[in-house]
Amino acid sequence: MNVSSILNQLLKQAGGQSSGQGSGNDMDIGKIVGNLTSQLAGSQGAAGGIDVKSLLGGGALGMLVGSKRGRKLGGKALKYGALAGVGYLAWNAYQNQQKGSSQASSQALAQQEGQPLEQLQGHAQEQRGLEILQAMIMAARADGHVDADERALITREIDSLGADAELHAWVERQFDAPLDAEALAGQADSPQAAREMYLVSAVIVDDQNPMERAWLDQLAKALRLPDGMAAELDRQIMASVQQR
């Protein structure tokens, strides 16, 4: 499956960049977040807040996170820029939790914790990409309001980014799979992957929606995140969008 190319384009959409097929793993995280910040600065003042779908250009990510019955998120829409640096933000959360304790070498940490998404290559990158994409789709479904028309639109948008037949079939299966936090958490191949899966889920859900908040809490428990890690990941999301 060509999941890495598709995921890379989705993350660029989160930063307000146009996506093109064949993109490499060469994202400028600061530039992406800066672009999103600039877009939001020009979008403030609209009645009822910012339309996320419109902000993200109506592309696949816009359909995934912004098609919830025209939901408006106001300034909270800014948090979608955090998707652009999901691996680094999750790693920063881990490092912040480790302050004051002895740290192993970088190589030992990579073996113990797993590498950030942006550093992976080959099969490891494809596997982590599937985990991240699966978490995103499940989070988008958490309120139970992705109907058949929205599902078809989201799938079509992902296909438009160049998804091959195998990835297309995989995406379809994700819409049919039960919303099972334990099963989703079981896909995480490392503690770093677990942090990234929680982070993308936290970005996508509306924490004011009880069903979506409940899903995020279930996922945090299923991922067996250490005490305080979920809160630290949430802080990383908010800190990332305050950068200028």
Image (cartoon, rainbow, N blue to C red):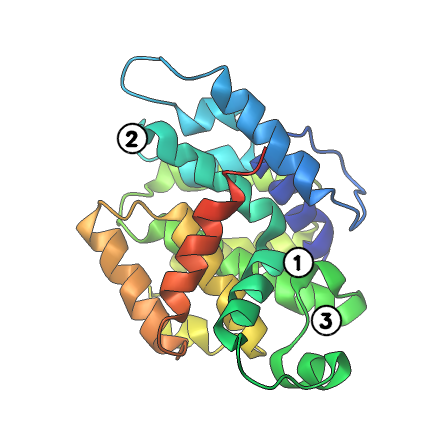
* Disc 1 packing (10 Å; few <14; some 14–19; many ≥20): few
**C-alpha span from label 1 to label 2:** 30 Å
> Is 83 displayed left or right of 177 in the figure?
right
- How many numbered circles does the render carry? 3
Mark 3 and mark 2 lie on one chain; the one further toward the N terminus is: 2
Q: Are marks 1 and 2 in contact (CB under 8 Å)?
A: no
At x 49%, y 20%, the residue is 41
Instruction: Quarter of the image for the N terminus: give it.
Output: bottom right
Give the quadrant of the C terminus. Answer: top right
User: According to the image, label 1 marks what residue?
Assistant: 166
Q: On residue 69, which mark appears?
A: 2
Q: Which residue type does callout 1 highlight?
A: Glu
What is the secondary structure assignment of the residue under circle 2? Answer: loop
* Residue 181, image x, y percentages: 35, 70
Residue 68 sits in quarter: top left
Q: Nearer the viewer, residue 228 or 72?
A: 228
Residue at the location (68% across, 55% down)? 3
The span from disc 3 to disc 1 (Cα, nearest Å) is 18 Å
Q: Of discs 3 and 1, which sits in the foreground?
A: 3
Residue 207 image offset from top left, x and y in percent:
27, 48
Counting residues from the start of the chain, the first of labels 3 and 1 encountered is 3
On the question of residue 148 being in view, the answer is yes
* Residue located 48% across and 54% down the image: 236
Q: Residue 124 location in percent, x, y?
A: 72, 71
Q: Amino acid at mark 2?
A: Arg
Residue under pointer 3 = 124
**Helix or strand or loop: what does disc 3 sit on?**
helix
Res. 174 visible in picture: no
Give the residue drawn at x 47%, y 22%: 54
Q: Amino acid at mark 3?
A: Ala
Q: Nearer the viewer, mark 1 or mark 2?
A: 2
